Amino acid sequence: MSDKLYKIILFVAALVMPVVCGGVFYALVTDAYEAFDYFGFLNFLTSSEWSYTEGNEQYGALSFITGTLMTTLLALIFCIPLSLPVALFVGEYFKGTKIASVLSTITDLLAGIPSIIYGLWGFYTLRPIMISLNISPQGSGVLTASLVLAIMIVPYAASLSAEFIKMVPTDLKESAYSLGATHAEVIRKVVFPVAGSGIFSSYILAIGRALGETMTVTMLIGNTNNIPNSITSTGNSMASIIANQFGEADGLRLSSLIAIGLILFLITALINMIGKVMIKRARIV
Amino acid sequence: MKKKFLPFLTMTLAIVMMSCGGNKTNGVREAQELSGAGATFPLPFYNAVFENFSQVNGDVVAYGGIGSGGGVRNLRDKIVDFAGSDAFLTDKEMADMDPVVHIPTCMGAVVVAYNLDGVKDLMLTGEVIADIFAGEIKMWNDRRIAALNPDVILPNEAIIPVFRSDGSGTTFVFTDYLTKVSSMWKDKFGAGKSVNFPTGQAAKGNPGVAGVISNTRYSIGYVGSEYAFAQNIPYARIKNTKGEFVLPSSTTISAAASGVIPTDTRCSITNADAAGAYPISTFTWLIIYKEQNYSDRSKEQAEATIDLLKYILSAQVQNMTSEVNYAPLPAKARELSMKNLKTVTYNGVAILQ
């Protein structure tokens, strides 16, 4: 009897998340319908117009999709040299030592800092540096946002990568050493190929985090509704345009913002799915 | 069981009685709970006023700063006692709902703030501001800015315009002014809560724009006066229709409403034709239904609503406006509003005699 009850409770609790997720998806689709219906789905995706002119409103998602992809990709590029050494340090060179556990704790701590703090740091510290280095006159833009994003996603990429590097079988490494390989060669020829897809998937999950980051990006990207024409120019990401304009929006603009939310939802889901598949592959090896 | 419950019950009863029955206002009616929603621009003023009102009168007022648009929507849905709005309702909006009365509560302005090392006094005209925000004047030492400011050494640097990324009444007032003074602006960009600014960068809310300006050399942007006054950031003198270069202040903002105002007070007072007027000034309104019996509202509730508006129009509250960085209504606007208040009815009978 109690076993049955236990099962039922478990089942109901497990059902909550899919129901919530399905509800979010349903609400996004129904509310975005007006925009897709008015502009056409493909046209909405490929138009970079975002114009409020009354009677001739034009909304398209391309500028924001570009903004999101640019910031995320740049953040990933900046994140690799920051996180991979940490992962190797913790997972291979100083595996199991006290200094490694201190370092990994500190890195994980970065994940706990609220994004507004990163945003403020970017606004008050990094932005003036960008101005004084003459990188851009106003300091904010895609590059500034990406740099701060990169630091924000380091803990996600580093700690998961370290776990995969730790999991590389000792026999494999020792046989390489017995053949006369140096430490660097072992890492290049054994650790990376074996842990590769695991490391890849940890970066995919880090990207998932960068895609939806709102506060930091809104504070640093400059919030202009155009396709950024260089990495130093201003723009808007999908999350930041929603954060900026949701409050006072209604009618077609509200629906367009929700449509952007739906696109972001789909892109994030896709990226996470790729990550999950890669993790599965990593386990098989 | 019963015995244990009894003290509880009496206590609850006592509290209930104290909170509704026991509290009488100055007059005879019982204290009411009023709710309103809308504009965020006058929020600090309203917070102070509503708190004083509840101390003086006993009525409690809850106001949600959800934006002018949301406030008007709530009033149309008849779920609030009043709406706050920075923009008066258009004829089309008026036609969509039961008759309403606009009561201006205080005045504010939009200032043009800038960040230029060592420049304490900058003079601008509406046309020049429009051209700066349209990206047609690109450099600080442009001869049109230099001609207005012969005593100022202007740097040979690019101007960085800063605007609002969110929809806002501040943007509406600012672009409404630019539309009046520049035909180029009117044709290309127009007025609205969100406008397609062609150049510069954007930030969210008055704090966002003010933060970017005070942190970015050679930038210029527009900020709500209540925020600019409290933050003490440098802002420009702007030329009015009389040819005077006016700095925004409590007095110059009020002066903008000293001209002719229509009886229903629905008017834009940007670029007002009045001496000493700061040209980017605005009213902010509370909007109520003319017939107060809707959604099962009691007569007491309707009376409390009228009492609140009467209180806001009183000299005592109007004198307080400048303390919280707003400007008082001129006497004429107050008289008009008192007259309008007298047209508000409950079941067809005027509430205020």
Image: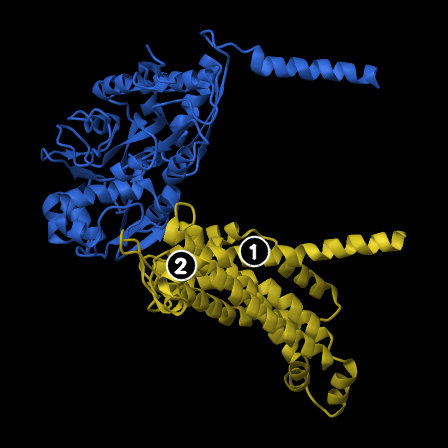
Q: Residue A217: image x %, image y %? A: 45, 57
Q: Residue A51: image x %, image y %? A: 30, 57
Q: Colour of chain B?
A: blue
| Tag 1 residue | A24
Residue type at tag 2: Ala
Mark nearer the N terminus (1 vs 2): 1
Q: Nearer the viewer, residue B97 or A281?
A: B97
Q: Colour of chain A?
A: yellow
Q: In which quadrant of the rendered view does residue B81 lie?
A: top left
Count of marks placed on residues = 2
Q: Residue A211: image x %, image y %? A: 51, 63
Residue B94 in the image: above or below residue B21: below
Horizontal arrangement in the rendering, residue A226 relative to residue B32 (left or right) = left
Residue B9 in the image: above or below residue B122: above
Chain ID, mark 1 = A
Q: Are marks 1 and 2 on the same chain?
A: yes
Q: Nearer the viewer, residue B332 or A180?
A: B332
Chain ID, mark 2 = A
How packed mark 1 is, by other alpha carbons closer than 10 Å (few <14, some 14-19, many 20 or more), is few
Q: In which quadrant of the rendered view does residue A257 lie?
A: bottom left
Q: Name the quarter where the C terminus of chain A is drawn.
A: bottom right
Q: SS class of the residue under badge 2?
A: helix
Residue type at tag 1: Val
Q: Residue A20: image x %, image y %? A: 62, 54
Scheme by which the image is coloured = by chain
Report how far apart the C-alphas of labels 1 and 2 lie in the structure: 17 Å
Checking the image for residue A35, the label placed there is 2
Asked if residue A125 shows in the view, the reply is no
